[in-house]
Structures are given as structure tokens and as C-alpha cells.
Image (spheres, rainbow, N blue to C red):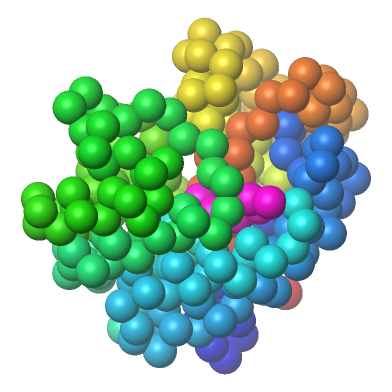
Amino acid sequence: MDHPADTAQLALLCEVAGTPKPGNVDRDRDLEGLRFEHFLAGAVGARGGLELAANGAAVGTAFERAVSGMARQRGGNTQFGALLLLVPLVRAAADDLDRPVCEAVVADTTVADAAAFYRAFEHVDVFVGEPPTGADALDVRRGAAAVPAVRDRGLTLRDVLALGADADDVAREWTTGFERSFEAAELIADASGSVLDRAAAAYLRLLADRPDTLVAKRRGMDAAREVQARAASLVEADAFRVDRAAVATFADELVADGINPGTTADLTAAGLFIALERQAVDV
């Protein structure tokens, strides 16, 4: 890929096309009202915002544009969390895609970036948990109505995401230098097979390593830990060798139960971008 926006769009497409990916839409599985083609359309629609990020636009502006484009398909929220990771990574790639540069990108975000982040919630319905204690005025579900409180408190986008970092692993990435995103990139690079096979393998490893925070918000931490334990039982400690039939059965069961480890999918998309941008894998 010649342009980070191209790479980011490809990462979104490869993420959804990897299979089996337990509990998530992939090329073999749809969820009720949310289908494979919705994710393809979301990746296409996000292109304008990804280009803005690659060309040096403010992170908040690029993110809101990406989300508004993503939301034009009929499935609803397909890649909000993935874009919240990809936009700063794409912005960093215009300089040097490493963790210190990523940390600098998020540290440089402004109150205006935070306001754009809140406005992005006006474009699509995103499932979120309750706001932290004492932060009701900053509840993202208020959308643009929360912007005056953001401005009054002088909160940057990094500040806002830090508020939710304990309960949301996408937000946590903004406070850890994208730790798990870079870990995902290493998993993808170390795996074997096509990029799609590598994406599915890395997804399963990430799911086995840590409870998915979207599952925890929707179903509770006990359910998230059960999903993690089941994923861990399917992964060999030092290899990507798995029983694909067993993983496919697990994937079908989670879809049937309506359990969606979507945060792990977001991290996989970010890892794909890093691996592809660094040419650690070829397409």
C-alpha cells in the first residue's frame, strides 16, 4: 500500500473477512441485522476520514468524518471502535508508526478533538456502559449535548478516553501507547497462512489473553471471563495450531447466544494495520 489510508481500509476489510472469528461477523457468519456486507460498506465509507488523518488533519475531525462515512450503510455501527484506534495510528504513520509517536499523537489532542468525538455519537448508535462516577455530564450517549461540559472542564480527547480506560480496552489503548494493538501486530506477523488466516488466529489469541470489555459491558464480567476461558482452551500455548472445527463451533455458539467480543475485533483491525503498514505481512 502506498498510502496509510489505503492500508487502514485494507485492515478493516481483512479483519471482517478473517474466519472463524468467534462471536463476530465474518465472511461465513452474520449477526441479526448486521451482515458481512455492512462491514464492507462501512470500510468504504470510512475512507474519507482515514485520508484526513493520513494527511495530517486533527484526530477528532478525522475520526468524526470516518464515523459519519462508516454509518451510511444500513447495518448501524460496524467499526466505531476500530476507527477510534485506526485514526490516531494512521496519523502517526504519516511520521513513524511506533509507540512513542502514537503516544505523542494522542497527547497532542485538544478540546476540539474531544468535541468532535462526542459529535461522532450523533451519527450512529454505539453501545456503551455507564459513565464513571461523577461524570454524568460527560456521558457519551449525550452526544453533542455533552460538548459544553467538555469545554468547561478543558478536557482533551485523550483526557476523555482516559476516564473510561478501566472499563473499555479501546479507550485503554489511548493511555498505554496502543500496547495491545502492537501486540496484535506481532501475533499477526508470527502466524502463518494468508493474512485472513493470521487475523483469525490473532483474534483468538487476543480473546484468550484478556476478557473482552464489550462482552463485559453487555453480559457482565463473569460471562466475559467464560468466553476468555473457552478461547484459551482452544489455543495451544506456544503455537497458532488450533482445531478449526472446534473454533468454528465456538463461533457459531457465540453468535447463537448473541455474545459479541467486538473489542477484540477492534484490536485485531488495529494490529492488521500496523502489520500491513510495516510490511510484516504481504497481500
Tell me which corner region of the image, top left, top right, bottom left or bottom right, holds residue 237.
Answer: top right
**Observer-nearest residue: 272 or 58?**
58
Q: Residue 272 placed where, x, y %?
A: 58, 61
Whether residue 135 is visible, yes or no, is yes
The residue stretch that appears in magenta: 76-81
Residue found at x 70% / y 74%: 44
Q: Residue 220 placed where, x, y %?
A: 51, 14
Tell me which corner region of the image, top left, top right, bottom left or bottom right, holds residue 13.
Answer: bottom right
Q: Is residue 192 left or right of residue 58?
A: right
**Observer-nearest residue: 23 or 132?**
132
Placement of 121 over or under 211, stated as above or below: below
Q: Quadrant of the N terminus?
A: bottom right
Q: Residue 246 placed where, x, y %?
A: 84, 24
Instruction: Count the marks.
Output: 0
Whether residue 185 is visible, yes or no, is no
Q: Is residue 79 magenta?
A: yes
Q: Quadrant of the C terminus?
A: bottom right
In this view, which residue lies farthest toward the left? 153
Q: Is residue 12 left or right of residue 135?
A: right
Prevailing secondary structure class for the magenta stretch in the rendered image: loop
Q: Residue 164 placed where, x, y %?
A: 30, 36
